[in-house]
Image: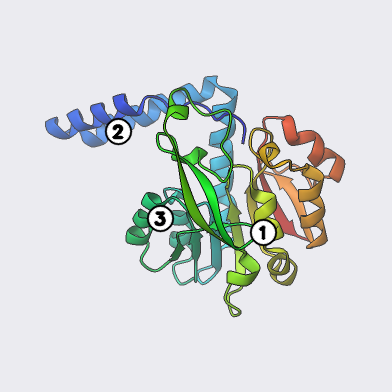
Amino acid sequence: MRTRPPRGSDTLRKALLSLATLVGREERVRGWVEHAGEARATLDPLARRELRDAHATRVVLASVLRTDSTAIDVGANEGTVLDAIVRLAPAGRHIAYEPVPQLCERLVGRFPAVDVRCAALADVAGTSEFSHVLDAPAYSGLRRRADLPAGAAARVQRIAVRTERLDDALPQDCVPALIKIDVEGAELQVLRGAVRTLERHRPHVLFEHGSGGADLYGTDPRDVYDLLDGAGLRIFDLDGEGPYSRERFQATFTEPIWNFLAAPR
C-alpha cells in the first residue's frame, strides 16, 4: 500500500541474465542477482518488511490449504501467490481475478486448471475505468495512485474493465478456505461485495491495507475492521501480532505494516 521498496534495475538484471545464458552460467548469475536483492533488503526497512511478509504468506498458505482446498486470488498479477496455491492444493477448485488483459492472458496459459477471470472484484457489478501502469503493473488499480515509481506515471493506460461481486459470481457449491486480496486500496469494495461469502464460509483472508492505497477510496480502517469482525473474523498482522482491536487497526493505517490476515474465531 505504501511506496514499495525498489526492486532494482530490471534492465540490468535482464541484461545480466541474457549474457549469462550466452556463456552457459545462467543459474549462477541468477543466484548472484537474487543475492544482491536480498543484501539490499537487509539495509532497507521496507524491503525487509516485504521479505518477512512474503515468507509469512507462504507459511499461512501452507498452514491453511489442504490438498483439495479452494482458494480465490483477487489481484493475481503475475501469479506468484497463485502458483503457491496450485502447488499446495493441486486438487482444489481455484478462482483468480486479474483485470489487466495481458496479465490475465498469461495466467490463463500458465494455470489451465484455474478459473481465471479477466475482471476486477468490487461491490458493484458492471464496468469501471482502470489505471493500468504499464511499467509497474503491480501499482495498477481502479484509482490511479499518486506514489508511482519514477517514470511510471508517464505510461498509465486507462482501460475499461469488467467488475463482479464475489457474492454473485461465486458458484453455490464453491467453499473457499482462503481469499487473498491485493487490489491497491480497493479492498473494502471487494469485501463489501463478498459479505455473504465471508459470513457463510468464514475463510482465511490475506489482504493488503494501508495509506497510499486505501485512502484513494476514502476508506476508513474502522470500516474494514467492522466488516471483517461482523463476519466472524479476527485481524492479525503477518508478524503474528493480534488479534487487533478496532483502535489498533486504525492506528496502524499509517505505519509500515500493510499485510494482514483475517482468521475465523
Give percent across and percent down for residue 136: 44, 35
Quadrant location, the N terminus = top right
Tag 1 residue: 123
Question: Could you tell me if residue 36 is visible in this image?
Answer: yes
Circle 3 sits on which residue? 104
Q: Quadrant of residue 216?
A: top right
Determine whether label 2 and label 3 are within 8 Å by CB: no
3D distance between C-alphas at marks 1 and 2:
42 Å
The residues bearing labels 2 and 3 have C-alpha atoms spaced at a distance of: 26 Å
Residue 234 placement: quadrant: bottom right
Secondary structure, mark 2, is: helix
Look at the numbered disc 1 and give the secondary structure of its residue.
loop
Label 3 sits on what residue type? Cys
Image point (20%, 32%), residue name:
18
Which residue is identified by label 2?
30
Secondary structure under tag 3 reads helix
Label of residue 13 in the image: none
The residue lying toward the viewer, choosing from 127 and 58, is 127
* Image position, residue 192 (x, y; %): 71, 58
Q: Up-down: is 173 above or below 133?
A: below
